[in-house]
Amino acid sequence: MAIDMKFKIGDIIEGEVTGIQNYGIFIKLSDEEQGLVHISECKHGYVGALDEFISIGEKVKVVVIDIDEYSKKISLSMRALDKINTPLFPVRNRRKKRRNLPDIGFKTIADKMPYWIDQAMKSIEENEFNTKIEV
């Protein structure tokens, strides 16, 4: 038994808002048929209260995204018709390559050099003093 439906998935239809519930919006598609736009299909992003978003009697464009052949329920989307600006390719962060150099160098040697010189001078003086006494 084939079901004769006026609408197909992918059809873009202009309909009238007939009801607003907290879970979605009912749209009158023809004199015999109506569909539901679920709250998640209203627009991109967060939708708080649907009655602030749309009002009864308003004409809207919707696209048919699903038809349940058993229950004859039509699922609609307004979000699918809204284009969002997204780049064709993901943006790559171009960072300049920085060499990871360890924090070492001659500064530590320059800091230690006076201490080393003092130690060496004391050692030399002690050796000279010890050699004079032994003779």
Image: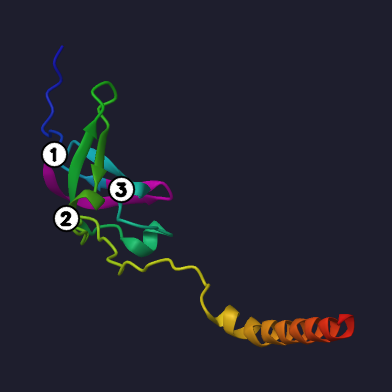
- Mark 1 — residue? 10
Magenta region, residue range: 11-26
Q: Earlier in the sequence, mark 1 or mark 3?
A: 1
Residue 128 included in the magenta stretch of the image: no
Q: Quadrant of the image for the N terminus?
A: top left
SS at circle 2: loop
Residue at 25% x, 27% y: name it.
Answer: 72
Relative to 59, residue 68 above or below: above
11, 56: nearer the viewer? 11
SS at circle 3: helix
105, 98: nearer the viewer? 105
Closest to the camera, between mark 2 and mark 1, is 2
Relative to 51, residue 107 above or below: below
Residue at 52% x, 79% y: name it.
Answer: 106
Amino acid tagged 1: Gly
Badge 2 local density, few (<14 within 10 Å), some, or many (20+)?
A: few
Residue at 19% x, 55% y: name it.
Answer: 89
- State how many labels appear: 3
Q: Quadrant of the image for the C terminus?
A: bottom right
Indicate the position of residue 115 as horizontal and vertical percent values. Answer: 70, 84
11, 27: nearer the viewer? 11
- Tell me: 131 left or right of 53: right
**Mark number for residue 93?**
none
Residue 20 included in the magenta stretch of the image: yes
Circles 3 and 2, Cβ within 8 Å, touching? The answer is: no
**Mark number for residue 41?**
3
- Mark 2 — residue? 88
Q: Earlier in the sequence, mark 2 or mark 1?
A: 1
Amino acid tagged 3: Glu
128, 2: nearer the viewer? 128
Q: Earlier in the sequence, mark 3 or mark 2?
A: 3
